[in-house]
Image: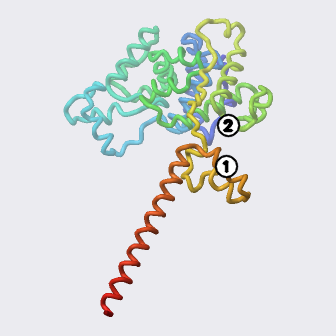
Amino acid sequence: MSAITAQHVRAAAKGKVNESNLASVLVALDRYGERFGMDRPHRLSQYFAQLMHESGDFRYDREIWGPTPAQQRYETRTDLGNTPENDGDGHLYRGRTGMQLTGKDNYRQFRNWCRAAGLDCPDFVKDPDAVNADPWEGLVPLFYWDTRDLNRWADQGDAETITKKINGGKNGLADRFDRLARISLVLLGYRADNILQFQADQRLQVDGDVGPKTRAAMHTALVALTPGEAARPEVKAAPVTEEKLVPVPVTPPSLDAPWWKSKEVITPSVIGGGASLLTAIGGIPWQNLLLILIAFAGIAGFLYWRKNADRKAVAKQVEGMA
């Protein structure tokens, strides 16, 4: 029997689940999960977090076909095994099951994977709709997980790498993290939203934020549910990425501020007194003192120019009156 039940999934879901689609996934896990190593809570939490994101809590097991412009391009996606002609391959091999198996090559690979595992499966290339029947619908996610070696990353609690392997990028990463936290909490005996209690029990910072340290603690707790699992060298603590503070050189405040805002300059005018002024001047950095001297020289030059200009103007007026 699988370590996860329909009750666990319902409790972790963000909305109402499609019971039929969920049952297909659980049937496959009950029959074949142990064969593919999917009988351990820390792996199942990663598995269901991704699957519930991709399927919208198991509501969707068939691609909704428009076709949209993007879907029309699938008609000639030869990289997926579809023909280069616009002959309907895109629609025929459209996304099916919770993991959205897409493209003729992927249907062929799934068929070959099933047969290599000794399963008497239909020819999904000839009958792609057959993947939506049990147990095949629930086996497609297992096929996807197995052929991409995702247990390796699940053993390390590395949800980000799993997302990249499934999605090709990090689309929906925040939702995947959130779903991972919810299903992990449920498997550990908490309510899906009771992150605060888990953090308190683990002596973490109780802030309700499911950050790297909280996810690492969840992973460790889930690993501990399987006797002897923590001793396996492949199983590691979930990666914790800490921000590294880069030292920034600190400039003395007197050099940061303009000379007219310098504390060393304005302090004497505030406290008053000749002795205080002399003390303050002695403590002024030479750069600020130079700026002060230049400013005074500029003012003196302006006053001298203005005095000469006034004198010349008066002399000119007197000359005109003569």
Nearer-the-camera pick, 87 or 73 = 73
Nearer-the-camera pick, 320 or 262 = 320
| Dot 1 or dot 2, earlier in sequence | 2
Q: What type is the residue that disc 1 sits on? A: Ala
Q: Position of residue 238 (x, y in %)?
A: 62, 20
Q: Position of residue 139 (x, y in %)?
A: 50, 21
Q: Quick check: 185 above or below 110?
A: below
Number of numbered discs visible in the structure rendering: 2
In this figure, which residue is indicated by the disc labeled 1? 280
In this figure, which residue is indicated by the disc labeled 2? 209
Badge 1 element: helix
Picture quadrant of residue 127: top left
Residue at 28%, 41% in the rendered image = 72
CA separation, marks 1 and 2? Answer: 51 Å
Could you tell whether 111 is left or right of 230 in the image?
left
Q: Quick check: 137 above or below 296?
A: above
Residue at 45%, 60% in the rendered image = 298
Q: Quick check: 145 above or below 287?
A: above
Q: Name the residue furthest bottom.
A: 321
Q: Position of residue 271 (x, y in %)?
A: 73, 57
Nearer-the-camera pick, 295 or 247 = 295
Binning the other alpha carbons within 10 Å of mark 1 as few (below 14), some (14 to 19) or many (20 upward) gives: some
On residue 47, the disc is none
Q: Name the residue furthest front.
A: 322
Picture quadrant of residue 35: top right
Image quarter where the N terminus lies is top right
Q: What type is the residue that disc 2 sits on? A: Asp
Residue at 36%, 23% in the rendered image = 106
Nearer-the-camera pick, 202 or 310 = 310
Picture quadrant of residue 91: top left
